[in-house]
Image (cartoon, rainbow, N blue to C red):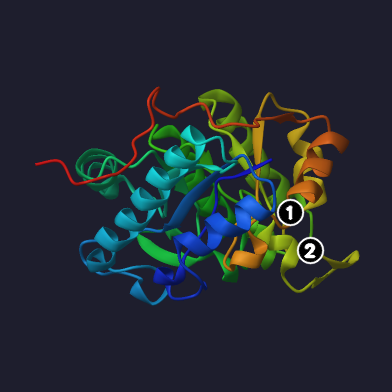
Amino acid sequence: MNNYHTHTYRCRHAQGDVADYVAAAAAGGLAELGFSDHCPYPDGRWRETRMDMADLPGYVAAIGAAKAAAVRDAAAGRASPKIHAGLECEWAPDLEAFFRDEFLGRWGLDYLVVGIHLYLHKGEWRDTYQISRADELASFAETSCGAMESGLFSFLAHPDVFCYNWMPWDESAVACARDILSTSARTGVPIEINGYGMRKARVSAPGGKRRPYPHEEFWRLASEYEVSCVVNSDAHRPVDTAANLADGREIAKRFGLKLIETLPSWTATPRESFPPKP
């Protein structure tokens, strides 16, 4: 099994550094480990829950050291997970050039993930965890679809996170889900079955207590579309590096979803380190 959604202490709401997660991945028998901590922004926006630009060199260097160590281990015949470097981003059209030129260009990261914790609604940023109106759901879907259409991201993290605060599985929820699922099918961008939602407190919904996400009905609906999915832990602590991967795979199996075991976007010769390009 693999996990491509991993955070470090730099995002200010996770614990541990790169080496701690690599050790946990090795102990858990993971073949590949991708780091996707919350990305920084040049204007410092949302810095309470993500790294600063000043933190990026240390993050990249720590992953580069882990990559180099993994290459040495493989050469010596020692089992070690393959390491990938990425970032998890919010999305808006005006950010695309920054993501492409800075993260994929200058820093040469392997991949970017998009996770819609904040979405654009009538020109303003709104908190996904506080969605309470149907028009806000529609804006969440629009932001999610725009991100997938950008071609910048290897997968859409927790596509059903809107269910955290939207309790009924009603026509508004279904419309939001269908927009996301049809765009995933059309663009070929995988969607994520997210393990972190399984570790969160249950929420009170009309049908009783349930996980905030993954939402069973979202993934049941996903079976009607030609989508592919990836299962990740979304680890915020080293101990959770491989957590709930088996549970996520069970959801994919139960609903007959196409499961991507290894992300297809890696370069043919993975980098051992990531110095910024001149």
Count the marks: how many?
2
Q: Say if 202 sits above or below 71 in the image.
A: below
Residue at disc 1, secondary structure: loop
Which residue does the numbered mark 2 point to in the structure image? 211
> Would you say 16 lies left or right of 97 here?
right
Q: Quadrant of residue 266?
A: top left
Task: Please tell me how crowded label 2 is: few (under 14), some (14-19), or many (20+) other residues with Cα within 10 Å.
Answer: some
Task: Please tell me how crowded label 1 is: few (under 14), some (14-19), or many (20+) other residues with Cα within 10 Å.
Answer: many
Q: Position of residue 118 (x, y in %)?
A: 46, 62
Q: Which numbered disc covers residue 214?
A: 1
Residue at left offset 55%, top offset 51%: 5
Of the 4 image quadrants, the one containing the N terminus is: top right
Residue at left offset 54%, top offset 64%: 128
> Would you say 207 lies left or right of 198 here?
right
Residue at left offset 28%, top offset 46%: 103
Query: Are circles 1 and 2 on residues that touch, CB within 8 Å?
Result: yes
Residue at disc 2, secondary structure: loop
